[in-house]
């Protein structure tokens, strides 16, 4: 899962990124409203946005309104020190999916983000399951046919993408952008290596290669 964090306070942004790292998210951070709007206008595949309202360049509320006017439905969790009921109503009316008042506990942030992502994907449970493979984002656990499986952070993130979107064909570039942040170095064959490890640790038929395009986890067993 790839998250865009838009927060101009460097210490708070660093704390949020540190807290989300064990959750297997790839977190990209911007500190300016105009930069955030430009990023959300492009083809970057963000699964959710954590958006501060008090931003330089362009206010977070303006960013949110502009994103929604363009029809972008990416889930947005607003962070703000504006705790008045009118402010919260305005944020929700502008298109925010959830609203968290500063200061906050990071556990609450993580729980709200998980719930927001579940709703956006039409899931009633946070547990993802298919083909005998079970992934629980809350406990960071994976099992295959009821046997526990240990995955690296990247393998976990990649498997989560496949389980969240069965039947979707992912290109290698898309998978790279989903599981790696902007500031992370990526080997040219990184995705191929991660897929190889997932097949070995789970079972080979789980992820199918689509020649010349990328990979897919079929909705039904092949």
Image: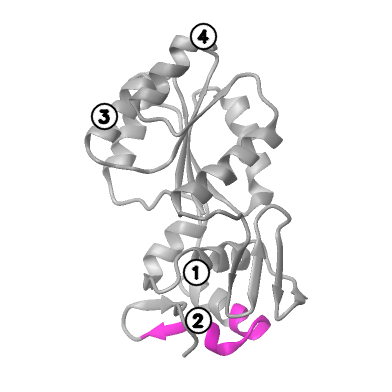
- Magenta extent: 197-210
Res 207 label? 2
- For image coordinates 69% across by 69% down, the residue present is 151
Residue placed furthest toward the left? 70
Label 1: state its secondary structure.
helix
- First-in-chain label (1 vs 3): 3
SS under mark 3: helix
Q: Nearer the viewer, residue 142 or 122?
A: 122
Q: Residue at x 61, y 19 (%)?
A: 102
First along the sequence among labels 3 and 4: 3
- Front tag of 2 and 4: 4
Closest to the observer, 49 or 182: 49
In primary-sequence order, the first of circles 4 and 1 is: 4
Q: Are marks 1 and 2 in contact (CB under 8 Å)?
A: yes
C-alpha span from label 2 to label 4: 48 Å
Q: Which residue is mark 4?
A: 84
Q: Disc 2 or 4, which lies upstream in sequence?
A: 4
Can you say whether 81 is above or below 115 in the image? above
Residue 212 lies left or right of residue 133; in this view the side is left
- Badge 2 density bin: few <14, some 14–19, many ≥20, Cα 10 Å: some
- The residue carrying mark 1 is 162
Residue 191 in the image: state x and y as whole percent: 49, 72
* Total labels drawn: 4
Disc 4 is placed on an element classified as: loop
Residue 66 marker: 3
Residue 214 painted magenta: no
- Looking at the rendered image, the disc whose residue lies closer to the viewer, 4 or 1, is 4
């Amino acid at each position: 899962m790839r998250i865009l964090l838009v927060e101009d306070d460097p210490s708070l942004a660093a704390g949020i990124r540190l807290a989300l790292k064990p959750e297997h998210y790839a977190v990209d951070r911007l500190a300016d409203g105009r930069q955030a709007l430009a990023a959300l206008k492009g083809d970057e595949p963000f699964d959710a946005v954590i958006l501060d309202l008090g931003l330089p360049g362009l206010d977070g509320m303006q960013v949110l309104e502009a994103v929604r006017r363009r029809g972008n439905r990416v889930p947005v969790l607003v962070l703000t020190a504006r705790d008045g009921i009118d402010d919260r109503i305005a944020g929700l009316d502008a298109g925010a999916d959830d609203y968290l008042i500063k200061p906050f506990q990071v556990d609450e942030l993580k729980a709200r983000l998980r719930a927001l992502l579940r709703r956006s994907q039409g899931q009633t449970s946070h547990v993802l399951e298919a083909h005998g493979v079970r992934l629980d984002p809350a406990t960071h656990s994976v099992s295959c046919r009821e046997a526990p499986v240990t995955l690296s952070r990247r393998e976990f993130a990649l498997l989560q993408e496949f389980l969240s979107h069965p039947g979707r064909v992912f290109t290698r570039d898309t998978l790279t952008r989903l599981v790696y942040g902007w500031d992370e170095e990526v080997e040219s064959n990184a995705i191929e290596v991660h897929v190889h490890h997932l097949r070995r640790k789970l079972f080979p038929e789980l992820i199918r290669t689509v020649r010349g395009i990328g990979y897919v986890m079929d909705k039904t067993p092949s």
